[in-house]
Image (cartoon, helix red, strand yellow):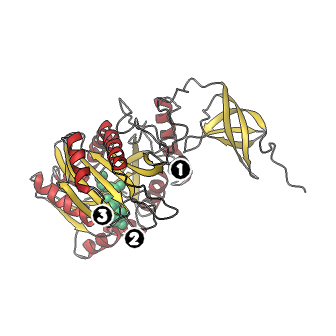
């Protein structure tokens, strides 16, 4: 039997009505049952689409025009939205973004975790879903004799020159622009990935939104930061509240932004920020949640799920600088945190001291190795909180938790797919997932954070 041919051809223009959205926020329309994935298409709208790629079972299209636009289509406020790879959802109403994320989590729970019975609550959104990010890392490129700084274009390493990013704290925007201008004035060249030549690679700026303190990190390929003194003076003149200026050396051919050598060239090793009543010291390499407003929402929910009475021993795995641990410690007997980055653990210890919290201990190491070691030492936590990176928990950690049998596990996740995968393993090991609360930590992008809790059966 001859194989059925796709009903569309490359470069053909077709009329499509979008039925659904992918998890990345692309519209899905069908032509005689054949799915076409179209960036910026919205469910319910009719559109003219140019077919750009045809595969056996599905194709890709480019939106030419929404002929009958969805009521949820909005004008993206960012002028470079359609070129930049940073945001994916500025063309849809905020309510549609929240609904899409809830469905993304529901789908993962159902299809990956086989947990369709577990309630996934509506996403907790932001009152003002703009200017929320406290940290930016911007690549720098050559622009004739000058420098440009901006995010990479979608699916490429071309830098889109931009003077602001409207999901960023304004201090970070201004800091990046100032460093770019100062470096340009002193004739410092941009690093070129292809030739592995040039000097300045990235500018990172982090603002403690509760304290107003700013840290800027200038990443160069070279060991020395040319015109260091002039750069420091000019930054301090422009930003009297800059608390820390850091030079980081990254001389490797890599996509990783920060290199191994970090020199504080002005001010402190840390900036401070506050979440609720707890104040944190944050150093350049430490993970710190990017959206402080929603972090508070997330941690409050995690704490509610942990439901501590004061007598519990709690483990916080993947603890970063101890943010969740110190929240938990206020309501538990003892908290043990584990984290792989030594600098972050040092910050966590200092943060405990700084906040006069004496019932929290931190260990450097891989959670999957330290947790079983704790088990061998006789540690039997009542509650375990995990907050792993996107790839989820290591299976050894999940198995060790199943063996140790804490009454309750609270799982914080930035990736619904790996969350659902890990919940399935925990369910098979004797736990019951109770409910999932998504939190919109990254408005205008397709990412979503979740917190959930499991009870021993
Ligand atoms: C999503 S962050 C959570 C940090 C912290 N709970 C917070 O809310 O700020 C994940 C953390 O896991 C750490 N990490 C990554 N792999 C790890 C591992 N195998 N063992 C322990 N920590 C790890 C990262 O360095 C990062 O600090």
Q: Where is residue 291 in the image (x, y as percent from the top left)?
A: 33, 42
Q: In which quarter of the image is the C terminus?
A: bottom left
Q: Position of residue 346 (x, y in %)?
A: 20, 63
Write the residue at 42% across / 55% down. Answer: 190
Asked whether disc 2 touches disc 1, contact meaning CB atoms under 8 Å apart, the reply is: no
Within the image, what quadrant is residue 171 found in?
top left
Q: Give the secondary structure at mark 2.
A: helix
Q: How far apart are marks 3 and 1 (CA)?
A: 26 Å
Q: In which quarter of the image is the N terminus?
A: bottom right
Regarding residue 141, the answer to whether it shows in the image is: yes
Q: Distance between the residues labelled 2 and 3?
A: 43 Å
**Lateral position of residue 142 relative to residue 388, left or right:** right
**Lateral position of residue 232 relative to residue 352, left or right:** right
Q: Mark 2 points at which residue?
A: 396
Asked whether disc 3 touches disc 1, contact meaning CB atoms under 8 Å apart, the reply is: no
Q: Earlier in the sequence, mark 2 or mark 1?
A: 1
Q: Name the residue under label 3.
A: 224
Q: Which of marks 2 and 3 is nearer the N terminus?
A: 3
Q: Residue 169 or 303: which is nearer the viewer?
A: 169
Q: Where is residue 238 in the image (x, y as percent from the top left)?
A: 23, 40
**Lateral position of residue 86 relative to residue 339, left or right:** right
Q: Name the residue under label 1.
A: 158
Which one is closest to the eye, mark 2 or mark 1?
Answer: 1
């Amino acid at each position: 039997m001859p194989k059925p041919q796709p009903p569309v051809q490359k470069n053909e223009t077709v009329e499509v009505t979008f039925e659904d959205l992918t998890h990345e926020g692309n519209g899905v329309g069908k032509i005689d049952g054949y799915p076409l994935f179209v960036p910026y298409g919205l469910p319910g709208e009719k559109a003219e689409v140019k077919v750009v790629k045809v595969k056996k079972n599905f194709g890709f299209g480019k939106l030419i025009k929404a002929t009958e636009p969805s009521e949820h289509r909005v004008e993206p406020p960012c002028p470079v939205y359609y070129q930049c790879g940073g945001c994916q959802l500025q063309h849809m109403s905020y309510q549609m973004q929240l609904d899409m994320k809830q469905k993304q989590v529901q789908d993962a729970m159902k299809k990956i975790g086989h947990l369709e019975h577990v309630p996934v609550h509506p996403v907790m959104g932001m009152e003002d879903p703009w200017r929320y990010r406290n940290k930016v890392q911007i690549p720098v490129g050559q622009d004739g004799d000058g420098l440009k700084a901006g995010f990479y274009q979608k699916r490429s390493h071309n830098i889109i020159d931009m003077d602001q990013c409207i999901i960023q704290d304004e201090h970070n925007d201004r800091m990046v622009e100032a460093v770019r201008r100062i470096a340009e004035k002193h004739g410092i060249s941009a690093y070129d990935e292809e030739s592995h030549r040039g000097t300045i690679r990235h500018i990172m700026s982090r603002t403690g939104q509760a304290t107003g303190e700013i840290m800027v990190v200038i990443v160069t390929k070279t060991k020395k930061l040319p015109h260091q003194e002039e750069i420091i003076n000019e930054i301090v003149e422009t930003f009297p509240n800059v608390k820390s200026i850091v030079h980081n050396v990254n001389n490797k051919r890599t996509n990783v932004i920060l290199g191994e050598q970090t020199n504080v060239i002005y001010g402190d090793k840390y900036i401070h920020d506050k979440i609720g009543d707890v104040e944190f010291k944050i150093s350049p390499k430490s993970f710190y949640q990017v959206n402080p407003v929603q972090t508070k929402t997330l941690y409050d929910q995690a704490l509610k799920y942990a439901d501590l009475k004061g007598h519990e021993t709690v483990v916080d795995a993947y603890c970063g600088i101890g943010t969740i641990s110190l929240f938990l410690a206020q309501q538990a007997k003892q908290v043990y945190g584990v984290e792989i980055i030594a600098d972050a653990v040092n910050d966590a210890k200092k943060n405990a001291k700084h906040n006069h919290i004496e019932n929290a201990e931190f260990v450097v190491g891989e959670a999957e190795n330290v947790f079983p070691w704790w088990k061998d030492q006789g540690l039997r936590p009542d509650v375990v909180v995990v907050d792993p990176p996107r790839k989820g928990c290591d299976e050894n950690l999940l198995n060790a938790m199943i063996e140790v049998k804490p009454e309750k596990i609270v799982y914080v996740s930035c990736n619904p797919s790996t969350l659902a995968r890990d919940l399935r393993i925990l369910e098979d090991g004797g736990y019951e997932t109770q409910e999932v609360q998504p939190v919109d930590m990254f408005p205008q992008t397709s990412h979503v954070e979740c917190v959930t809790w499991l009870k021993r059966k």
